[in-house]
Image: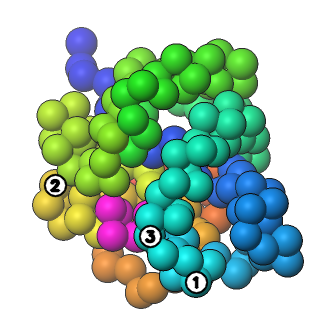
Amino acid sequence: MHRKLRIGIDIDGCVTCPTALVPFLQKSFDQNLKYEDITEYDLGKVLNQPDDIIQQWFKDYQEEIYRTSPVHKGADKVLNDWAKSFHLIFISARYEFLNEITLNWFKEHNIPFHHIELTGSHNKLEACKKLEVDYFIEDKLDNALDIHHELNIPVFLFNTPYNQSELPEGVIRVFDWRSLDQKLNQMIQK
């Protein structure tokens, strides 16, 4: 029996809707802020706020954000299909103390998983190595580039306003879960 392909998947901005933060940011900082305005991953730069203010804000709101984030459109259907054929490994920068909230969210939204790794850091490279992922799905540009470069695996990058850049071959921009599913299947068929 052959080994199932191991798909590494970031949670926030990939499985959860990338707009999930916006209402919280509007409430706390700028009610006119739109998702399209978030052109950098660094929220301090986007909101013109010092890092310590953003860090405290995130500490205050992260549990509620993670509990209430909607599913990225189409993710549940595709992931339920993939669970039959692939080993689904979710690798997130969330902290370990958020494990219960994370598991409850997956159950509530009927998202299948084989393993969830909460790294507490945006650097997911070591987790990808340790868990031997064959493909990775990400929304953070530098993570996508690092993982592809270091592990020489294809990385699918969900298109967002904060990750616009030229991409090297092997980092593939995707716009929704349906197109991601098609591109992954085409790649596997080769």
Q: Is residue 124 left or right of residue 174?
A: left
Residue 91 seen anywhere in this rendered image of the structure: no
Structural crowding at the residue carrying mark 3, measured as other residues with C-alpha within 10 Å and reported as few (<14), some (14–19) or many (≥20): few
Amino acid type, label 3: Asp
Rounded to the nearest angstrom, the CA distance separating label 3 from label 2 is 31 Å
Between residues 116 and 26, which one lies in front from this camera angle? Answer: 26
Residue 16 drawn above or below residue 87: below
| Magenta stretch secondary structure, dominant | helix
Query: Residue at 68% across / 36% down in the picture?
Result: 64
Judged from the image, the secondary structure of the residue bearing numbered disc 1 is loop
Q: Is residue 167 left or right of residue 61?
A: left
Between residues 183 and 23, which one lies in front from this camera angle? Answer: 23
In the rendered structure, find residue 76 and report the number of the disc placed on it. Answer: none
Query: Residue at 52% across / 17% down in the picture?
Result: 100
Amino acid type, label 2: Leu
Rounded to the nearest angstrom, the CA distance separating label 3 from label 1 is 9 Å
**Residue matched to label 3:** 51
Amino acid type, label 1: Asn
In the rendered structure, find residue 48 and report the number of the disc placed on it. Answer: 1
In the rendered structure, find residue 151 and report the number of the disc placed on it. Answer: 2
- Asked if the magenta segment contains residue 141, the reply would be yes
Q: Is residue 112 left or right of residue 133?
A: right
Q: Which residues are magenta?
A: 140-144
Q: Earlier in the sequence, mark 1 or mark 2?
A: 1
Q: Is residue 93 left or right of residue 37?
A: left
Judged from the image, the secondary structure of the residue bearing numbered disc 3 is helix
- Asked if the magenta segment contains residue 12, the reply would be no
Q: Residue 187 appears at what percent x and percent y?
A: 40, 53
| Labels 1, 2: front one | 1
